[in-house]
Image: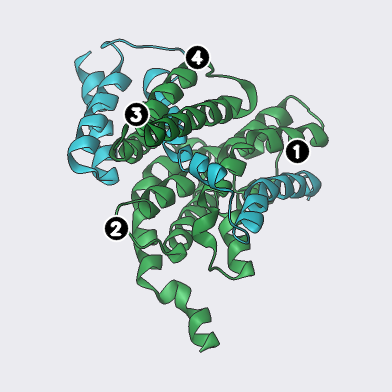
Amino acid sequence: MAHALLILGMAAVTFLTRGLPIAILTRRTLPGGLGRWLRHIPVAVFTVIAVQGTLAPTGEFRLSLGSPYIWGGIAAVVVAWRTGNVFLTILAGLAGLWLGRGCL
Amino acid sequence: MAQERAQAAWQSAPFWSGVRAALPLLLGITPYGIAFGLLGPTVGLSAAGTVAMSAIVFAGSSQFVALGLLQSGTSYLLIVLSTLVVNLRHLLYAGSIAPYFRRLSAPRKALASFLLADETYAVAIAHFRQPGASPAPEFYLGLGLTVYLDWVLSTTAGLAVGGLVPDPTALGLDFALPATFIGLVVPQLRDRAAWATCAVSAAIAILARGLPGRLDILLATVVAATVGWGVETWRTRS
């Protein structure tokens, strides 16, 4: 296979970034400060992808009720807040987006 | 006894509840797997190479970046380096989720590492942190293996169907992933530190969007988590 070396190289560096912290941090306890810092990572990561996909879906920043993605985002936030259910949130987000596209 | 324990992962309830938790994610992941299968041959990857990349690398963003670089004739070494940069954010994911993997055997830790991606990390950590949850790593393995199978199968499907598939953007399925993350982050906003983290991360996400190598994710995460940590520390002290 012509690209075997490339694929193996990509696989190796990917596995390294995923595996190294797991190999080390499952064996020893974290210093307290670092452990408390890492607990804030999830909210930070979730927000980046949620915000970019809603406010800059094509890379251009667009905060306007004329953007169907805003309607998808509003519907998703409301349903996530009321139900805490990820599947319902996805459905609400898609429904909001479709409605936004249909009505605008 | 040891044998019973070895069989336990896929017979356990947490494993299957992880499989179920993966199902809504597939809505957002499948179209991109299909797209990857469609695009692979257009930049000169063989059918086997396209599937092998999904099956061995299993990293959506870097795979698409690699396609773009292959098209422009970039050297293998630079493509591998850009994969490393695109995946630096996994260091943070892995560090944050590692404490939940302590009781896994070494081969299972390796499997758990291999399966770590934006979606699997996000859903698993949100599940583990629910108040009163008993965080079983088998949940993560069920979740990860389901997403992995979907990624490889949808890549294969993309190769098979050629240009017949409609554009995911036209169907709005490009919004399934952001909607997933909205569903994950909103229930986490329980205290001021979380609100501060969210606000700072949102601001950087907008200002730094489009930085090459997905460094925008890394930058926003590091700064926002530090602010959240600062707010928490300050509030406990005062």
Indicate the chain coloured green by its letter: B
The numbered mark at residue B132 is 2
Upstream in sequence: badge 2 or badge 3? 2
Upstream in sequence: badge 3 or badge 1? 1
Q: Residue at x 78, y 51 (%)?
A: A1
Q: Nearer the viewer, mark 2 or mark 1?
A: 2
Q: What residue does disc 4 label?
A: B207
Q: Residues within 10 Å of mark 1 (few under 14, many from 20)?
A: many
Dot 4 and dot 2 residues touching (CB under 8 Å): no
Q: What residue does disc 1 label?
A: B80
Q: Residue at x 24, y 25 (%)?
A: A74
Pick whichever, B81 or A82, lies toward us.
A82
Upstream in sequence: badge 4 or badge 3? 3
Q: Amino acid at mark 4?
A: Leu
The numbered mark at residue B195 is 3
Measured in 3D between alpha carbons, the distance from the residue under mark 4 to the one under mark 3, in whole angstroms, is 19 Å
Measured in 3D between alpha carbons, the distance from the residue under mark 2 to the one under mark 1, in whole angstroms, is 42 Å
The residue furthest bottom is B1
Q: Amino acid at mark 3?
A: Trp
Upstream in sequence: badge 2 or badge 1? 1
Q: Residue at x 63, y 38 (%)?
A: B87
Q: Residues within 10 Å of mark 4 (few under 14, many from 20)?
A: few
In the image, taking residue B90 as reference, residue B75 lies left or right, namely right
Q: Which picture quadrant has residue B68? A: top right
